[in-house]
């Protein structure tokens, strides 16, 4: 059966390679690359028909049969919303959600389900799932299953469309974003640790220090800068086209095409990173900027605990949380907080929504709005206040603004 693989071209662009059966080739396969995913999908469909692999699907009437088909599609082909098969890790997550869906007491065959049935299922999820977020993800997967069945003519329409569980907007607004002062405290802590009199600490922080600076300077996800190769260090920018895939045992292209992007770099940080590359006295088969002593990529867990959390401790960014009657010290932030800080800075600098989406590597603009919409609104309100646009009743209290960081 033909398959599609997303590839990064030599010029940095994205291509879609179709591998299909060709008995005239020594390997038994031939390859053809397309610029667009739709072109690759059309060619793959033609080859599947030639191979006789696209016959009519068996009659599906039960939820468990639908889940089984969906998982097979995700593993072998990729759904209508995705251009390629999912990773083994993602497939495992989908299978777990499928198990939750099956626990519900479905009393009707697929073709007889109605929207009220899905609403009742939603209520059951909210009462029986471990968290609201888990319930939301399971319902979203169920809707994807129904959409796939509808597109393939197994059911008349996606009766789950329009039924959803919203994220808690209040929680989004309370996202912990470091201030400019806190970020500089973290970077100063990295400077201090890299110059420690303890050789072991200093050696580790010769690598951790430029990582921390790059994270704040670029807004990259941790799995992106941990997999960052030296050949993607451009003269004045970072070119992102790969990431560590969950659960952390492989490096691959970014999860979506939107993740492949170029990010402007501060000159001082770029010099620091390139200097760190020159200092490395061991080779990495992956040509990594920040490899371990064995040339492998660092695990996110090790970086979080041994690197980032240590910098938080040195910078005094520690909180106490009461657990079972005891006060436990914990870092105030996680590595991902630097990504949120970066977003807050470019928002405060006046970037429009589309530019923010592109810089953050979001596939859907809804993701950008869900994560940072409250910051955009806060900036707009602040601009109105500065322009003298005071509310109807003359209330002039200025909303809390977002600090603008000076170039690193």
Image (spheres, rainbow, N blue to C red):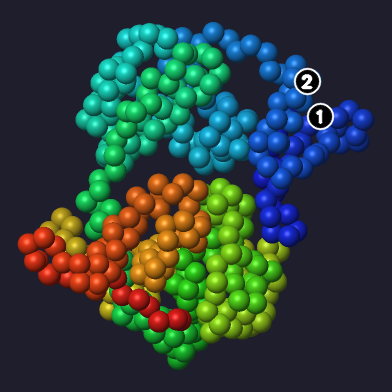
Q: Disc 1 to disc 2, how far (Cα)?
A: 8 Å
Give the structural element (helix, strand or loop) at label 1: strand
Residue assigned mark 1: 21
Residue pushed farthest left?
393
- Is 407 left or right of 297, judged from the image as shown? left
Can residue 341 be seen in the rendering of this structure? no
Q: Find residue 56 and report its image quarter.
A: top right
Circle 2 residue: 51
Q: Position of residue 147 (x, y in %)?
A: 47, 24
Q: Residue 38: in sight, yes or no?
A: yes
Q: Position of residue 123 (x, y in %)?
A: 23, 26
Q: Quadrant of the N terminus?
A: top right
Q: Nearer the viewer, residue 408 or 313?
A: 408
Q: Position of residue 119 (x, y in %)?
A: 27, 23
| SS assignment at label 2 | loop
How far across and down, in percent of the image, does residue 139 sit? 36, 30
Q: Could you tell me which residue is drawn at 12 percent across and 70 percent down?
A: 396
> Do the numbered discs 1 and 2 sit on residues whose CB atoms are within 8 Å?
yes
Residue located 55% across and 48% down the image: 255
* Closer-to-camera residue (119/244): 119
List the single residue furthest toward the bottom: 197
């Amino acid at each position: 059966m033909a398959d599609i693989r997303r590839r990064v071209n030599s010029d940095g662009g994205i291509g879609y390679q179709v591998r299909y059966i060709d008995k005239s080739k020594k390997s038994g396969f031939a390859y053809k690359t397309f610029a667009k995913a739709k072109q690759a999908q059309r060619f793959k469909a033609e080859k599947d028909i030639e191979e006789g692999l696209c016959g009519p699907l068996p009659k599906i009437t039960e939820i468990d049969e639908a889940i089984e088909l969906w998982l097979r599609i995700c593993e072998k082909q990729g759904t209508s919303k995705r251009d390629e098969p999912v990773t083994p890790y993602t497939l495992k997550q989908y299978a777990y959600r499928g198990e939750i869906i099956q626990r519900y007491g479905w009393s009707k065959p697929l073709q007889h389900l109605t929207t009220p049935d899905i609403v009742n299922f939603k209520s059951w999820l909210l009462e029986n799932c471990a968290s609201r977020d888990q319930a939301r993800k399971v319902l979203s997967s169920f809707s994807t299953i129904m959409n796939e069945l509808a597109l393939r003519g197994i059911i008349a329409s996606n009766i789950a469309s329009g039924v959803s569980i919203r994220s808690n907007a209040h929680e989004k607004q309370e996202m912990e974003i470091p201030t400019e002062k806190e970020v500089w405290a973290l970077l100063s802590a990295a400077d201090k640790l890299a110059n420690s009199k303890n050789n072991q600490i200093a050696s580790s922080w010769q690598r951790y220090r430029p990582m921390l600076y790059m994270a704040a300077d670029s807004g990259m996800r941790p799995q992106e800068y941990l997999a960052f190769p030296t050949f993607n260090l451009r003269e004045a920018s970072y070119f992102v086209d790969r990431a560590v895939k969950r659960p952390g045992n492989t490096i691959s292209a970014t999860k979506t095409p939107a993740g492949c992007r170029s990010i402007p770099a501060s000159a001082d940080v770029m010099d620091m990173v390139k200097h760190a590359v020159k200092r490395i006295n061991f080779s990495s088969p992956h040509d990594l900027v920040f490899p371990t002593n064995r040339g492998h990529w660092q695990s996110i867990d090790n970086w979080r605990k041994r690197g980032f959390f240590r910098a938080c401790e040195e910078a005094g960014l520690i909180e106490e949380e009461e657990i079972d009657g005891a006060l436990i010290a914990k870092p105030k932030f996680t590595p991902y907080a630097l990504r949120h800080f970066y977003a807050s800075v470019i928002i405060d600098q006046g970037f429009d929504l589309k530019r923010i989406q592109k810089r953050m590597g979001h596939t859907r603009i809804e993701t950008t709005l869900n994560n940072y919409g409250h910051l955009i609104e806060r900036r707009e309100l602040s601009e109105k206040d500065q322009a003298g646009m005071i509310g109807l009743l003359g209330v002039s209290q200025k909303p809390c603004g977002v600090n603008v960081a000076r170039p690193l």
